[in-house]
Image (cartoon, rainbow, N blue to C red):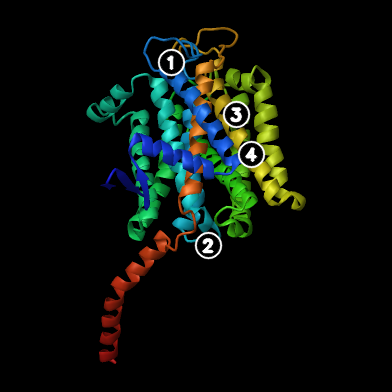
Amino acid sequence: MQLNGRALILGHTLPIGPRAAFAAVAREAGSMPVALRLWIAFLVAVIAVAGIAALIALPPGWEVLGTTPSFEWGLLIVGYVFFAIMTSGLCLASSLGTVFGIERFRPLEKRHAILALSCLIAAFGIIVLDLHYPVRMVFGAVFVPSPTSPMWWMGVFYGIYLCFLVVEVWSMFRGHPLIHQAACFGAACMAIVAPATLGAVFGVLAARPFWHGPFTPILMVASALLAGTALLGIVFYLVHRLRLEGFERAASLAIPSIRIVLAVGLVVVSLLVARHTIVGLAGGTPGLAEATTALVAGPLAWQFWGLRVALGLVVPVVLVALPATRTPAGTFLAACLALIGVFVDRMTFVSAGQIAPTTTVSGVVSSPYAAYTPSPVEIGILVGAAAFVALAYTLAERYLDLREADAHPFLRMTAAWLRRRLAPAEMVGALAEGDDR
């Protein structure tokens, strides 16, 4: 809504003229604490550098990425998968409160939605830059559908997911509880369907035996839960530490609840990683043992054992298991290491599927291993995406009302609605039985 050169946005009257807007931004920046100003300035600078990298990567024909014909999927695909599954994990963890009505998970509601929407926008931005043809991608998916392709369904489901998240955030702050609860339920469903379909994009590739198989979608969903819960653990520790809105319930409810889900995610992912590694070494599929050997005893071994297994799984499990470290600080450290571990896991997963020579069908002809080094452009884009998520959340924390909403979970509202609908019929039945008596 515009009135006399001003716009009403989320209940705030903001100037829209260039000079007035600049003066308003300057006044707002002056009212911020020094640490917050420095943090926002740092994030804006990182995003500006990433914007330059994005402009360099966008024109077709410019060889600015580190990928090769032997190593076609690189850091940008890893970044897309990482942010996309983290979106799903945020919704899965929060759905325990928003959908299933478990009280201790209710503090996650608003912050998870802001983070999930930001992460999914970042994921879309990364994949657009990796494909080089964003306009062709949109029109091709709409006007030339391919229902037999998991990649097409992945785009469809994540597009629907984005719509659910937008509606969820809008209804959350505009006071539409019924719409909000329906959007929460839809987002929770997409939080399972979307990463499973993303895993199927890898799992159906028979020419890449390390990726191929039905357990790839399962591992993707489990990694999503772990990544989203880890990000919530980091955020709610900062809420508690900086005494932000709702910090009391962050310490008493949110952080202990996150610790429980984090422990479950760590155990499940550990079992799936162990199963994948054992089957890879013992399996007789051509190319699978070579790829797994490259992971556990080849060029990827230090990343796998040092970063993925030791720091990303073993240490976090110890931190959430020992009574002495079951504290907000211990949960924060476990969440940080788990999030790093998920990223390294996605990096080694994508790399191991391409690094070992198999057949000319898969396009891998280098020997003994295919080489890949991320370019500065890829690194800049990925770091810029992380800075975008951090900036979006920082601004939301400062300007939006992130107090817990007084809303009934979707399943409870549905049950209450059914009881109201069924009550007259039950009363009629009871009266009829009384007449018979």
Residue 289 falls in image quadrant? top right
Q: Amino acid at mark 1?
A: Ile
Tell me which label, 3 or 4, sits earlier in the chain: 4
Tell me which label, 2 or 1, sits earlier in the chain: 1
Mark 1 vs mark 3: give the one in front. Answer: 1
Q: Which residue is mark 2?
A: 103
Q: Mark 1 and mark 4 in contact (Cβ < 8 Å)?
A: no
> Is 83 left or right of 435, judged from the image as shown?
right
Tell me which label, 2 or 3, sits earlier in the chain: 2
Q: Position of residue 366 (x, y in %)?
A: 54, 7
Tell me which label, 4 or 1, sits earlier in the chain: 1
Residue 138 falls in image quadrant? top left
Q: Mark 3 and mark 1 in contact (Cβ < 8 Å)?
A: no
Marks 1 and 3 sit apart, C-alpha to C-alpha, by 26 Å
Q: Position of residue 352 (x, y in %)?
A: 56, 21
What kind of element bears circle 2? Answer: helix
Marks 2 and 4 sit apart, C-alpha to C-alpha, by 25 Å
Residue shown at the point (46%, 11%) measured from the top left: 363
Marks 3 and 4 sit apart, C-alpha to C-alpha, by 12 Å
Number of numbered markers:
4
What kind of element bears circle 4? Answer: helix
**Quick one: 62 or 151, which is closer to the camera?**
62
Q: Which residue is mark 4?
A: 336
Q: Which residue is mark 3?
A: 344
Q: How busy is the neighbourhood of tag 3: few (under 14 within 10 Å), some, or many (20 plus)?
A: many
Vertical comparison of 241 with 57: above or below: below
Marks 4 and 1 sit apart, C-alpha to C-alpha, by 31 Å
Q: Position of residue 11 (x, y in %)?
A: 37, 53
Q: Which residue is mark 1?
A: 56
Q: How busy is the neighbourhood of tag 1: few (under 14 within 10 Å), some, or many (20 plus)?
A: some
Which of the image's four quarters has the C terminus? bottom left
